[in-house]
Each structure stands twice: as C-alpha cells, then as structure tokens.
Image (cartoon, rainbow, N blue to C red):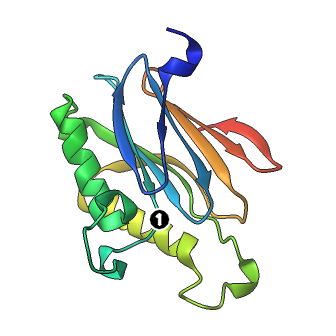
Amino acid sequence: MNQGELVVKVGIADMKVIKSPLTIRTSGLGSCVGVVIYDKKMEIAGLAHIMLPDSALAKSGELNSAKFANTAIKELIRLITIQGGRIHALDAKIAGGAQMFPNLAGSDIMRIGPRNVEAVKDELNKHKIRILSSDVGGNKGRTIEFDPTTTFLTIRTVNEGVKSI
C-alpha cells in the first residue's frame, strides 16, 4: 500500500469514518467547517465537511445529512460508534468557517462561515463532545488532514502555510 492509499478523501457535504493507519482529508474549506470527531484510544475518526448551519435551509427533496451541522454531527457520531468508537470517549477538532466575502459581513445571510462555526459548536455541546482545538474564522481557504494515531489535525491555509493542532 503506498502513501496515497492511506488517505481517505472527504468531499464537500460528505462524511466518512476511518481507523488507523488511515488518515482522513478534506479540501476546499472556505465558509464550510471541517469537523473531526474521534476516539483516541480506539484510533477511530470521522470527518464531516459541513456547508450550512441548519437543515431548515434545505430545499425539498432528499436531505443530505452531511451538508448541515444539525444533522451531520449526529450522523457522524452514529457512524463512529458503529465502527467501535465509544460515545463517552469522543473528542473533536474543527477548522474552517472563514468569512470569504468580508465586505458582506454585515449581512447575516452572508455570514455563513461564522454561523457554521456557531452551529457546529452548539451541536457538539448538545452531544457533550469537547472541542480540544480549533482553527476557525479568517478569510482564507483551508485543507485539513487528521491522523487518528497521533490525533494531530494538520491545516494548510492559503498563503499562510501549514500547522498542526
């Protein structure tokens, strides 16, 4: 197995769960929020690429639960526990939620990034999952990758380089 096969990619409005030695990555986080929920001891992690704060914003038709904070976090917890994660041992790390159009920040509708961050924090709090670290806000895009073995969330921010939290 080569290095490329060890990384599971998560698309926009998508979620996946992995076990070590795999890592999990999502790209294109602007106003979207990447939420990683993991069980450190079991080395299981799930990542959701959340686009919007609330499923009430959904248009009619089939609901994509990964798209909204209020549905994605609940579903991600369910998927992690199916794989052996323990609810009482889950922690989270989050990144994203940029204000991609700062000149429109006065409009609540255009404050998607900050509203996404608030909704994600509220949902994690409802499920009593601690946020151990975060890198949110700003006005630049991010790519994140999580390793369930080390529990490092590596963040590559446009024009700002790479850091781990």
**Residue found at x 77% / y 50%:** 158
Secondary structure under badge 1?
loop
**The disc labelled 1 sits on which kind of residue?**
Met
Vertical side of 78 occupied by 24: above or below: above
Tell me where residue 91 sits by quadrant. Answer: top left
- Answer whether residue 22 is visible to the viewer in this image: yes
Residue 44: percent from left, percent from top: 32, 28
Who's the residue at 19% across and 34% down the image? Answer: 86
Residue 113 appears left or right of 92: right
Q: Residue at x 18, y 37 (%)?
A: 81
Task: Using residue 162 as the reference point, say whether residue 144 is left or right of it.
Answer: left
Would residue 58 appear left or right of 113 to someone viewing this image? Answer: left
Say whether residue 125 is visible. Answer: no
Looking at the picture, does residue 37 appear above or below residue 108?
above
Which residue in the rendered view is the most extreme toward the right? 159
- Neighbour class for label 1 at 10 Å: few (<14), some, many (≥20)? many
The residue at the far top in this view is 1
Which quadrant holds residue 132? top left
* Quadrant for the C terminus in the image: top right
- Residue at horizontal 73%, vertical 60%? 140
Residue 136: quarter of image: bottom right
Closer-to-camera residue (94/103): 103
Q: Position of residue 121 (x, y in %)?
A: 40, 62
The residue wearing badge 1 is: 51
The residue sitting at the bottom extreme is 107
Height in image: 123 above or below 95? below
In this rendering, would 34 be left or right of 43?
Answer: right
Image coordinates for residue 88, horizontal then vertical, percent: 20, 40
